[in-house]
Structures are given as C-alpha cells and as structure tokens.
Amino acid sequence: MRVLHSQKLTTPRPPLATSISKWRRAVPLYVMLLPTVAYFLILTYYPLVHSVFISLQNFNLIGNRPFVGLQNYQAVLSDPNFWAAFRNTLFLGASILIIGFFAPIVIALSLNEVLQQWAKRTLQMVIYIPHLFSWVVVGGLWIQLLNPAGGLVNAVLHAFGVPPVQFMSDPNTARWVIILVSVWKDVGFNCILYLAAIVGINPELYNAARVDGASHWQEVWHITIPSLIRTMQVVGLLSIMGLLRLFDQIYVMRNAVIEPKVDVLMTYVYDQGFTQMNIGQATASALLILVATLLLTLLTRRLVQFEL
C-alpha cells in the first residue's frame, strides 16, 4: 500500500503546454456543437420551462393570466375523464408494447430461415412498407377495409357465411383493431433492427456449435436469441418511452361511439387544449405525462441495466 501510495503521489502531471494544446484542438469540436445546443435550448427546453409557468396560470389567449398555483394540477387529478384516459392508455399501450415486442422477433427469426435471398428481401420490403405511411393513410385504409358496408374484410367473411362485423362500432372490438393495426404498422421497422443484429453475429459461433453437435434449434436458442438481447433492450426501452404518448392512431381511428374506451392521455390533452381551450389544465396534464414517462424510462433502464 505504501508503494502504491507513493507511486500515486509521484505520478507526473501533464505539462501545461500539453493541456493548452488539447483544449485548442477541442475548441473547433465545441464550436460545431453550438448550433445543436442552441437548437435544443431554443426549441425544446425553453418551451418546456415556459409550459411550467403556463400550467400555474389561468391562461387566456387575450387578457390577464393570473397565477393559480397548483389549481390546474388538482383539477386534472380530480377529473374522472383523466383517470379513464389513464386506464385506456395502460391497456392499449401495454398491449401494443407486449405484442409489438415479441412479433418482430418471431418474424425476424422466421425470415432468417428463408434461403432464397430474393424472397427474403421481398418479404422484408412488404413488411416494412406500412411503416412509411402516415397514420392518416393507415387509419383511413383500415377503416375502409373493415367497413361493414362493402369493406374487403367483411366481404371475405360474408363469403364464408359470417354476418357483417361492426369492427369500429363495438368499443371492445375497436380496441383490439387499434392495437393490432399499431403493431402491423411498426413491426417491419423493428424486424429490420433484429435482422441487422442477426447478420452481425460471428459465424464462428455457429461453426463451433455444429462441431459440438448442436441442432439448428439449439443454435437459435443458445446463440441467435442471446445475441439479440442488446437490440431487445433498445427496442423495449423505446417502446416504453412511447407507451404514455399514444395519439396519432387514436385520433385518426376513434369515433363518438368508441371514444370512452379508446381515448388516451394525449387525446385528453388535445381535447382540453384545443377543443375546450382550457390551456392551463391541458399543459398541467401534459407535464404530468412527461414526468410519468421520465420515471417509467428511468425505472426500466434500472431494471434492464441498460446503458448507452
């Protein structure tokens, strides 16, 4: 210990000229970062701080904006519509998270077994294309396909003697339609991530497994799937970060009949802010969602021990 202590004390410091030279080399890099830092400060963090002030005000577009303290937060937390939207968000978000997490893994492992490259690439493209469409296009497409009066799905069911199904008029059925359409739209993007991770696996691992007599299923179970854990962590964390922020698919596909069962926290914010012009309460609810998302993300990172 004495020797180590003495070595630590006698470790020479870098010359002052060397330190100055390092700082001079780093200055251009810091200057290059300035536009990015300015972008986030002006367009992200300033509006965020300003929204905190709005949430504490009786905000009016014209006229006085008196401070009301935590009154907007109390109004949000005592509003039964907020808690109904919270329950809907948990059901829809958790269902999309679970199905949308495992579906691309299964599809990627299945596509990896396709031997013909042209067939593999064609299937990848077909699965990925829905991700390129906006929710306006996707929502309108599926509403038309599921239309009980002439929609393709009901036409196929009619050919098998099944009576027309009111997919978007029954709240319970509409919930699952929104869940499955959400998974269908994004499954191709996550599948591409898993396929890229599979391509990066060292082939020597498979060769060594074959020498040891491993079956094909054992190779998948002991080599391929463990190699995807890092990608699973990224996909899972990104999905959890979006769990409480469902909006586009709900806004496009909802109607007056199913609203009580599909309205989520972000549609609550939209209705409060733009329909009822209750800006203070809408901002307070949006900040509560932001804090809940941040806590959920930190908790997930801690549980999966994920570090960037």
Image: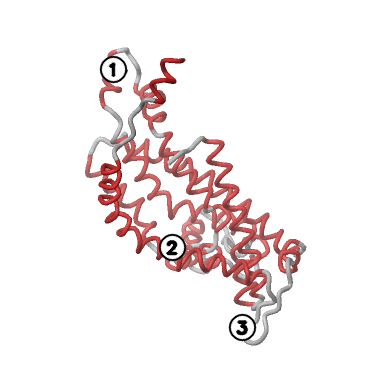
Residue at the disc numbered 2: 40
Left or right, 246 with respect to 129, comes to right
What residue sits 54% from the left and 57% below the top?
Answer: 178
The numbered disc on residue 32 is none
Tell me if label 3 and label 1 are in contact, CB under 8 Å.
no
Q: Amino acid at mark 1?
A: Ala
Q: Position of residue 259 (x, y in %)?
A: 64, 66
Residue at screen point 22% across, 44% down: 118
Say what secondary structure mark 2 lies in: helix
Residue denoted by label 3? 61
Three-letter amino acid code of the residue under disc 3 = Leu
92 or 273, which lies in front? 273
Please tell me which of labels 2 and 1 falls first in the chain. 2
The three-letter amino acid code for the residue at tag 2 is: Phe
Query: Real-space Cα distance between discs 2 and 1?
Result: 49 Å
Distance from Cα at disc 3 to Cα at disc 2? 26 Å
Within 10 angstroms of label 1, few (less than 14), some, or many (20 or more) residues?
few
For residue 60, above or below residue 232: below
* Element assignment for label 1: helix
* Distance from the alpha carbon under mark 3 to that under mark 1: 69 Å
Front label number (3 vs 1): 3
Which of the two discs, 3 and 2, labels the residue nearer the N terminus? Answer: 2
Do callouts 2 and 1 mark residues in contact (Cβ within 8 Å)? no
Q: Is residue 204 above or below residue 45?
A: above
Q: Quadrant of residue 12?
A: top left
Q: Nearer the viewer, mark 3 or mark 2?
A: 2
Residue to which mark 1 is pinned: 208
